[in-house]
Amino acid sequence: MRHLYLPLARSSVNVPRCTFPTSKPLIYRPHFRIHVPHYSQFIRMASTITLPSIYGSVPVNIPPHISLTLTELTEFPAFKSWISRLTSSLGSQNNPDGYSLRHLEVTNVVRFGTKKIGFLMLNAVVKDAEDKTSLPGAVLLRGPSVGILALLHPANTPKDNLYAILTLQPRIAGATTSMAEIPAGMLDDHGSFAGAAAKELEEEVGITISEDKLINLSELAIQASPLLDKDDTKESIGLANASPVSDSPSEEVKKQNLDGLFSSAGLLDEVVTYHAFVHEIPEGELEEWQGRLTGLRDKGERITLKLVRFDDLWKATRDTKALCAWGLWKGLQEAGKLPY
């Protein structure tokens, strides 16, 4: 370790004269130390990798403090889906200003465990054909999620006598230890949105169901939407109207199923697909669900259930997922598209 000595403010303390040829007393100046890292700590430099030609051979800048390979980046499902759709969208006819992706800058990587990428933060430099306008390009990639509107229907009561199940759990990002929201989770490794929805319902609420019992609210809403092109591709619903770029047909089909709603398209790539499920219970069992403790305790989930009359859900939570699911159910019901 090396140390650099720097002078501080002048002091009036005198020290004995030295042998230098001077007639004035030597003025003592106190010093402090600062640590100067050894040159070996600066050996790692920022690197640049290049995306495959299918994505336009766009350069990606990676700062020295982030360890990320081209393979890790292109195999991260959230990135692959995002760059595929962005490449397709920029190349479509809905880009009259000629916007193009010039380069990407990785700003942070959050891993689950030691290897698996969980979240990826980057800045996309997108400019028009004349280099006059740049688009905001901060992006947080986390991949698709599912939200489940779990409803309880007491037997021998009117069909519209429904109660929504909310989960109360800590949400540090929301600065609360008790956020009321509908069950939800990342798609992760469940293989399908319905499979992920069924698993989240089992883990957070304690109801085990088969996937075919779920009502895909997102899919029904898009099928009923007038905002479809003539070839049934997506337009202003939130997905690119051109087919996503893909080097694998199976991957392309999977991406086409992202028919959910964007939670915050100004920053997040997250698309939430909404499912619903009505669980019939004995009439006198309703109170037993209130305050039930659930969640995977070994993974830090501390969940308490809360029941709310479905018609009152819109004013019983500030969770946008719950409000989206409530709105989709109401809209489909009014349009006669709800299979319940």
Image: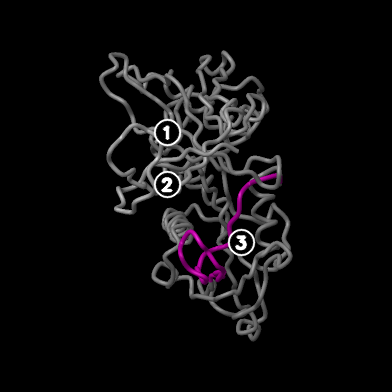
- Per the picture, the main secondary structure of the magenta-coloured stretch is strand
> Which residue: 31% across, 48% down?
9
Q: Is residue 181 magenta?
A: yes
* Residue pointed to by mark 3: 277
* Residue 71 percent across, percent down from the top left: 67, 25
Secondary structure at numbered mark 3: strand
Q: Above or below — where is 113 with respect to 178?
A: above
Instruction: Give the residues in magenta.
Output: 164-189
Secondary structure at numbered mark 1: loop
> Which residue: 54% across, 76% down?
307
- The tally of labels here is 3
Secondary structure at numbered mark 2: strand
Q: Earlier in the sequence, mark 3 or mark 2?
A: 2
Q: Tell me the quarter of the image containing the C terminus.
A: bottom right
Labelled pair 1, 2 in contact (Cβ < 8 Å): no
Q: Amino acid at mark 3?
A: Phe
Q: Earlier in the sequence, mark 1 or mark 2?
A: 2
